[in-house]
């Protein structure tokens, strides 16, 4: 332990980062900036090629020169796990999606199964993937046996949930408070010490299970409050009030209120997924999370509600005869992230009803998903397109959209983001 402690303090530890995506690559960047040697492990060969060519599109690392770090022999990329035995710290940043609305931990299981033969005493392994309480113990601690390894004594295990906010320029990895935990006191100490080398504020949780639960709870909190905002908007619309005006009033209260806003649904890997992990955990313990389940349903139903709203509003002309221009494909503004984006459900509804539409999103020039029948290409916001497809559906309020230009050249806007100003010449609903 003393040797590992010294290596961490001196930034001479070799760190393995497994999974080079939205979480793993920003972590690599932070470690490289602190002069750690980094071994990156990624099963996707095309991702490795993108990193080597400096063609990564993830906003948090888009301007970082990974190629320079490779050339200077500070960053090494691998598609197999043999080099794990040469590392001191192993950080697992693989996806934990849903499969049939149940947690899918297959990526974590595969990683552990593949690295077991390469681990050795005096290593620290940290799981960053979002998951339910008990995962780190059952999938990592309980699997690591033999080779003179005693977890908590000469081999160390920690859990520190990732906290990334894609597109948020005010909160880099360094500035986002980091929750850490460990299987034993020594494990917690080393995990805490490691993250303190490159993150400003680190908070040590009581135990691993508390840290695991905290990640799910903080995103479930957001899901529930977004659902409340969506439901309140539906009610406000029915009595001819503007929910955004109402929220402005509420925000004047200096305590007890945090603003959440309605929209076309929730996206990304965290807010739509994490509540389902808690719901699943509750069922395993003979309990039903009524509020969580209802919030998930409300948010998941928003694309359908938006479609029905458009259909009802355009009832004088068949919606099938309308040409609709969708603005925004990413799940939030100013990023190129399509994960769980509401546009997927919207397009499926449009396809089912054979509605003629195009979309624009400069961050996502090609729209393709396993949940779509075909790929689509982003179209320019030109006078010609706006006048031909003069029914606008605003899904993502990217900063580059020219409000005045769009409003001057269309007939009606369905604005799910409160992006456009009221214009007497254009109907905005």
Image: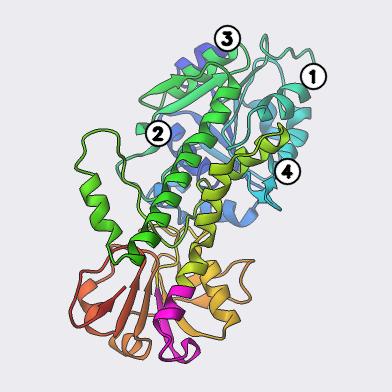
Q: Secondary structure at mark 2?
A: helix
Task: Give percent across and percent down for residue 75.
Answer: 52, 38
* Residue ID for mark 3: 185
Residue at the front extreme of this rendering: 239
Inter-mark Cα distance, 3 to 1: 19 Å
Disc 1 versus disc 2: nearer the observer: 1
Inter-mark Cα distance, 1 to 4: 20 Å
Q: Residue at 54% across / 20% down in the picture?
A: 181
Q: Is residue 429 magenta?
A: no
Q: How many marks?
A: 4
* Residue ID for mark 4: 106
Task: Give percent across and percent down for residue 404.
Answer: 20, 75
Which quadrant of the rendered structure holds the N terminus? Answer: top right
Disc 2 versus disc 4: nearer the observer: 4
* Residue ID for mark 1: 145
Residue range of the region highlighted in magenta in the rendering? 308-326
Nearer-N-terminus badge (3/1): 1
The residue carrying pointer 3 sits among few (fewer than 14), some (14 to 19) or many (20 or more) residues within 10 Å by Cα, namely some
- Please indicate whether residue 76 sits to the left or right of residue 99 in the image: left
Nearer-N-terminus badge (1/4): 4
Q: Secondary structure at mark 1?
A: loop
Inter-mark Cα distance, 3 to 4: 29 Å
Q: Are marks 1 and 2 in contact (CB under 8 Å)?
A: no
């Amino acid at each position: 332990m003393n040797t590992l402690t010294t290596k961490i303090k001196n930034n001479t530890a070799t760190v393995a980062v497994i999974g080079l995506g939205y979480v793993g690559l920003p972590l690599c960047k932070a470690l490289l900036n602190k002069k750690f040697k980094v071994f990156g492990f990624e099963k996707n060969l095309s991702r490795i090629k993108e990193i080597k060519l400096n063609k990564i599109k993830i906003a948090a690392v888009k301007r970082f020169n990974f190629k320079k770090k490779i050339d200077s022999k500070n960053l090494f990329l691998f598609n197999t796990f043999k080099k794990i035995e040469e590392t001191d710290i192993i950080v697992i940043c693989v996806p934990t999606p849903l499969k049939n609305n149940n947690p899918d931990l297959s990526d974590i299981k595969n990683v552990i199964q593949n690295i077991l033969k390469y681990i050795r005493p005096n290593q620290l392994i940290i799981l960053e993937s979002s998951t339910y309480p008990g995962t780190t113990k059952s999938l990592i601690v309980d699997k690591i046996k033999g080779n003179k390894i005693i977890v908590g004594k000469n081999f160390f295990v920690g859990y520190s949930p990732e906290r990334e906010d894609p597109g948020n320029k005010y909160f880099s990895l360094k500035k986002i408070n980091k929750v850490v935990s460990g299987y034993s006191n020594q494990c917690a100490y080393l995990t805490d010490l490691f993250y303190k080398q490159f993150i400003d504020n680190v908070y040590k949780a009581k135990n691993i299970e508390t840290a695991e639960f905290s990640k799910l709870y903080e995103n479930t909190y957001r899901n529930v409050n977004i659902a409340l905002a969506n439901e309140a908007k539906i009610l406000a619309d029915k009595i001819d009030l503007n929910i955004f005006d109402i929220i402005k009033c509420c925000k004047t209260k200096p305590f007890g209120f945090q603003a959440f806003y309605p929209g076309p649904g929730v996206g990304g890997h965290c807010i739509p997924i994490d509540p389902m992990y808690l719901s699943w955990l509750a069922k395993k313990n003979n309990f039903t999370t009524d509020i969580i389940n209802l919030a998930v349903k409300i948010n998941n139903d928003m694309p359908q509600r938006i479609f029905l709203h458009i259909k009802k509003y355009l009832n004088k002309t068949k919606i099938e005869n309308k040409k609709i221009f969708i603005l925004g494909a990413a799940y939030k503004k100013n990023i190129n992230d399509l994960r769980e984006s509401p546009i997927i459900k919207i397009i499926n509804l449009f396809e089912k009803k054979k509605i003629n539409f195009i979309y624009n999103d400069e961050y996502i020039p090609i729209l393709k998903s396993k949940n779509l029948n075909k790929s689509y290409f982003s179209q320019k916001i030109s006078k010609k397109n706006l006048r031909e497809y003069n029914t606008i559906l605003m899904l993502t309020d990217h900063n580059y959209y020219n409000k005045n230009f769009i409003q001057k050249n269309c007939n009606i806007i369905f604005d799910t983001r409160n992006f456009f100003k009221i214009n007497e010449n254009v109907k905005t609903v």
